Amino acid sequence: MLLTLFYTAAAVAVISTALVVTQLNAVHALLYLILSLIASAVVFYLMGAYFAALLEVIVYAGAVMVLFLFVVMLLNLGQRTIEQEQAWLQPGSWRGPAVLAGVLLTELLWVLATGSAAETGHVVSSKEVGIRLFGPYVLAVELASMLLLAGLVGAYHLARRGGRLR
Amino acid sequence: MSVGSPLNIGLILGAVIATAAVLIWVERRLLAVWQDRLGPNRLGPLGLLQVAADMIKILSKEDWVPPFADKGVFVFAPTVIMVTMLTAFAVVPIAPDVGIIDFNFGLLYFLALSSLSVYSAVLAGYASNNKYSLYGALRASAQTLSYEVFMGLSVMGVVMLAGTFDLRVIVEAQQNLWYIVPQCLGFAVFFIAALAESHRTPFDLPEAEHELVAGFHTEYSGIKFGMFFVGEYIGITLSSAMMVTLFFGGWHGPLLPPVVWFVLKTAVFIMLFILIRGSLPRPRYDQLMAFGWKVMLPLALVNLMLTGALVLMVGSDA
C-alpha cells in the first residue's frame, strides 16, 4: 500500500515536472511546478520526513512559487510569448538535451533494477531536525542566513525612497 | 466514537459546511443589530430560512465564464480555497475523542494549508484577465505572504511552551493554564494575522469595492462566486477554531461537555471577526504593509525571545 502511494506520488512529480518544461503558457507551467513540489512533499511524507514535507509545502509551494507567479502575472506576457515558446520547442533545440537526459534515466533505472530496494526511512522528529541544524550543520545555516541578509539589504537598497539614486 | 472514525469525519465535515452556510445569515443579522437595523428577518423563524433563499439564488444563477478568461485556471481557482480550508480542519482537535487525525506536526500542517490557500486569489486574479482582478490578486498575495510570516512566528511561543507541534498535546498541556495568559502578545499577533489571511475587513483590500470593483473575484458569478464566499467563511471558522485550540484551552472548561465548550469558544471568535468588520475602517494598502513589517514582525520576535528566555530560566522539560 505504502509502496503504491510512494510510486504514485513520484510518478505525479516526474510527469508534472516534464509538463513544466513542455507547457507553452508560463502560468500553466508554474502550476505544474507547484504540483510537482506538492508531489515531492508527499514523497518526503511517505519516507517519514514529516517536517521536511511540511516545510516543502510552506516554503516552496506556499511562498517561493507565489512570488514566481506574482512576477509572471505582473509581466502579463500573453499570446506573443506563447508563440515564442513554441519556436523554442522545435525538435532541433531539445533533441540533444533529451538524449543526454535519456542516458541519465537509463542509468537511474539500471541502478533501481539491480540495487537494493528503496530504504524505508524512520520517522524524523522536529527535535532531531533542530539538533542536526544547529549541531553538525551550523556552518551551513549561518552561511545561508548571511546570504539571506545580503539579499535583504540589497532589496532594501534598490527599493528605498529618496535615496541618492533618485 | 474515536478519532478518525467515518462517523466522526462525516459529522465534522457536515458541521463545518453547515456553519459556513449559517454564517451568511449570522453575519448579516449581527451586523444589522450592531448598526441599529433589523437585517434579514422575513423568511422563517428569525429569518433563518434566508440561508436557503441565498443558496437557491446562488445555485440557480447563470454560471458565466468570460470569453477572455483562461478557462481551466478560472474554474480551478475557487476550488483551491474550499479544498485547502476543508482539509485543514482534519487536524483540529475538537474534543478528547472527536477529531479526524492526530498528526504530530498538526500546527505546521495548518500553516502549510493556509499558505496554499493564497493561490485561490492569485489564480482567480490572473485567470480573469481583468485589471481590477489582477490588482486584487497582487494585493492578496503580498498581504498573505507578509502576514503568514508573523502568523508562523506568533505560534512558535505556544510550540515552545508545549514542546510539540501536535495540536492535541497542545490542548492537553493547557489543562491548568490557558496559553492566552503567558502568550497574550502571541495571541494578538496571531489574531491580526488571521484577520489579514482571511481577507476580512479591515484587511479586505484585495477586494476593496471602492477602488477595485470586487477585486480578484470581479468576474465570478453563480456557484463559483459562492465558493469564494463559503471558502472565506470556512477560513474564519478555521481561524477561530485554531485560536481556541492554541490559546484558549480547546475543549477545557467546567460543567459542560467538551464539544459544547469548543463550539461555544469558536462561536465567540467568529462573532468577534464580524464585530470587527462592523466597527473598524479600512486602512490604506501601504499602511497595511508598513504595519505588518514595522509593528507585527518586531512584536512577534520580541514575544519569541521572551518566551524562549522564560522557558530556559524556568528550565521546564519542554
Image: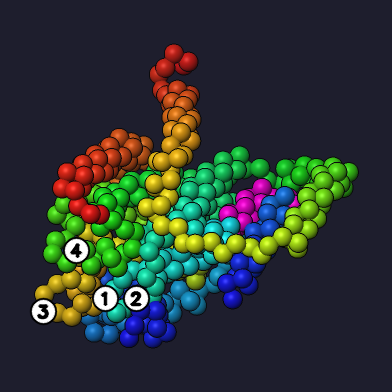
User: Of the residues under marks 2 and 4, which one precedes in the sequence?
Assistant: 2
Q: Find the distance from the CA under tag 2 to the CA under tag 3.
A: 21 Å
Residue designated by label 3: B255
Label 1 crowd bin: few (<14), some (14–19), many (20+), radius 10 Å: many
| Segment tinted magenta in the rendering | A22-39
The type of residue carrying mark 1 is Ala
Q: Is residue B288 visible?
A: yes
Q: Where does label 2 land, which residue?
A: B99
Residue located at (37% from left, 70% from top): B102
Lateral position of residue B169 relative to residue A13, left or right: left
Q: Is residue B21 left or right of residue B82?
A: left
Horizontal and vertical percent for residue B79? Answer: 51, 66
Q: CA distance from mark 1 to mark 2?
A: 7 Å
Describe residue B25's horizontal placement relative to residue B314 as left or right. Answer: right
Q: Secondary structure at mark 3?
A: loop
Give SS at disc 2.
Answer: loop
Lower sequence index among marks 4 and 1: 1
Q: Position of residue B120 (x, y in %)?
A: 50, 58
**What is the spatial separation of the Cα atoms under label 1 and label 3, in whole angstroms?**
14 Å
Pointer 2 local density, CA inside 10 Å: few below 14, some 14–19, many at least 20: many
Task: Judge whether B274 appears above or below B49 on screen.
Answer: above
* CA separation in Å, label 2 and label 4: 18 Å
Picture quarter with the N terminus of chain B: bottom left
Marks 4 and 3: in contact by CB < 8 Å? no
Q: Secondary structure at mark 4?
A: loop
Distance Cα–Cα, label 3 vs label 4: 17 Å
Q: Regarding mark 1 in the picture, which secondary structure is present there?
A: loop
Disc 2 chain ID: B
- Contact, mark 1 vs mark 2 (Cβ under 8 Å): yes
Name the residue tied to disc 4: B174
Q: Earlier in the sequence, mark 3 or mark 4?
A: 4
Q: Residue at x 54, y 59 (%)?
A: A44
